[in-house]
Image (cartoon, coloured by chain):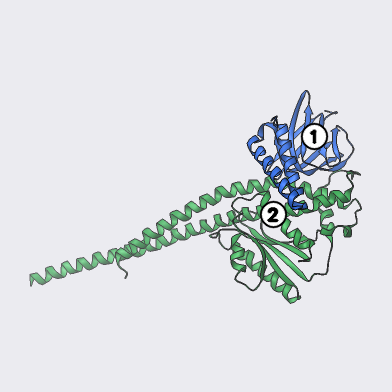
Amino acid sequence: MPALKDIQLKIVGTKKTQQITKAMNMVAAAKLRGAQQRMEDFRPYAGKFASVMGELAGAGADPNAFPLMAVRDVKKSALLIITSDRGLCGAFNANLINAADKLLKGEKEKGRDTGLICVGKKGFDYFKRTAYQVLQSSTDIMANIQMANARQVGQEIIRMFLEGEVDEVKLLYGRFVSVGIQKPTIKPLLPIRPEGLSEKEEAESEGPKATYIFEPEPEYILNQLMPMYVNVQIMAAMLETGASEQASRMTAMDNATKACDDMIQELTLVYNKARQGAITGELMDIVGGAEALKG
Amino acid sequence: MANQILLEIVTPTKLVVSQEVDLATIPGADGVFGVMANHAPLIATLKSGEMRYATGGDSTRMAVSGGFCEVSSNNRITLLAESVERAEEIDIDRALRAKERAERRLAEADAHREKIDMARAQAALTRAMTRLRIAGHQT
């Protein structure tokens, strides 16, 4: 039986850990509210953007005329993986990294060379130690997600695509389904697919279809909007990953707090048993001593 | 009301304006244009500049930059911009600093003949100047 003092120390230690996990749970809950709000505020913008893009693409523009829509033979592809900067959020980042690993293996089997673009520290920390090539990384931007960050990442990706360094870019992020569910999701980013755009448009258009006046001509507008559309998609993915991270952390910390509770309960039981054992032992000693004195 | 049109201004962070207006004046890439009720459907890109909208007798001015606008057939204007600021929200000091920075960059880029930097600095300068003008700052 372990010494009483040791058990007591363990109980105190576990209680302290529990305080921390409880605090982290509450902080994550507060941050989740903020992140979720930002995500929802961004939705009308992203939605409108997609529907206008669909409108434009449906205006009869030739997709091959646009460099960002050009479908090329894929020799080298890139995966943009968005993870969190900080850990202690359960299996969230591990799930994202696993999904990426799987995709990378699949691409390799097809004989395609895939490079990585990492947003968020966790993904970068993992992939810099692997044999895969990290083309670019931006860390420490997930705490305060700004459009400017998304634009920076987007610009670099567009440059790589236009200069032929990569022929295809996919996006992997933690989709926020609900507070309880976050799903690693893969989406094609470049080349931009016109059919993907018109799909969205159909879902969102209301009433009869109108013929638009374009000013300037649709080709010009599309050329202007396409890079912005890439940025918008990256931004949306970053916001979703941010919200997912907090939700995942909240759940993880809640579980940890519960585990602490269980542990404390168990330890207290052991402690009480040990204490009783000790008291019984002492009593036996006293009784034994008294008996001996009686002679 | 029959002769008003719904104006919605959306940025990545929020829905800035959503109200019925008599007239919206929008800085299109091909020039400034006005939109009133029952306008034909239109999609246009914007350049950074000043937009105005009027309801009744009141007129509001705003600095917009980067984006586009859609006038749809159901009497609604949707303006998507990367940034939108009302006159009273504009940080004059910041705009002044941005203007100086852009002017300095322009001078440098001019010396080195760097086209991209020059375009970027020019755009930054336009944005700063618009902000200052709308905020009513004398330059």
- Badge 2 density bin: few <14, some 14–19, many ≥20, Cα 10 Å: few
User: Who's the residue at 47% across and 57% down the image?
Assistant: A257
SS assignment at label 1: strand
Q: Residue furthest top?
A: B57
Q: Does the rendering let one see residue A202?
A: no
What amino acid is found at the position of numbered circle 1 in the picture?
A: Leu
Which chain is mark 2 on?
A: A
Q: In the rendered image, which residue does mark 1 sit on?
A: B6
Chain shaded green: A
- Locate the N terminus of chain B and report the quarter of the image it occupies: top right
Rendering coords of residue B83 (x, y %):
71, 42
- Answer left or right for A12 relative to B45: left
Q: Nearer the viewer, residue A138 or B108?
A: B108
Which chain is mark 1 on?
A: B
SS assignment at label 2: helix
Q: Residue furthest front?
A: B111
Q: Does the rendering let one see residue B18?
A: yes
- Answer left or right for A295 relative to A226: left
Residue B71: quadrant of the picture: top right
Rendering coords of residue A83 (x, y %):
62, 60
What amino acid is found at the position of numbered circle 2 in the picture?
A: Gln
User: Who's the residue at 67% across and 31% down the image?
Assistant: B88
Q: In the rendered image, which residue does mark 2 sit on?
A: A152
Q: Nearer the viewer, residue A174 or A1?
A: A174
Q: Colour of chain B?
A: blue
- Answer left or right for A15 relative to A236: left
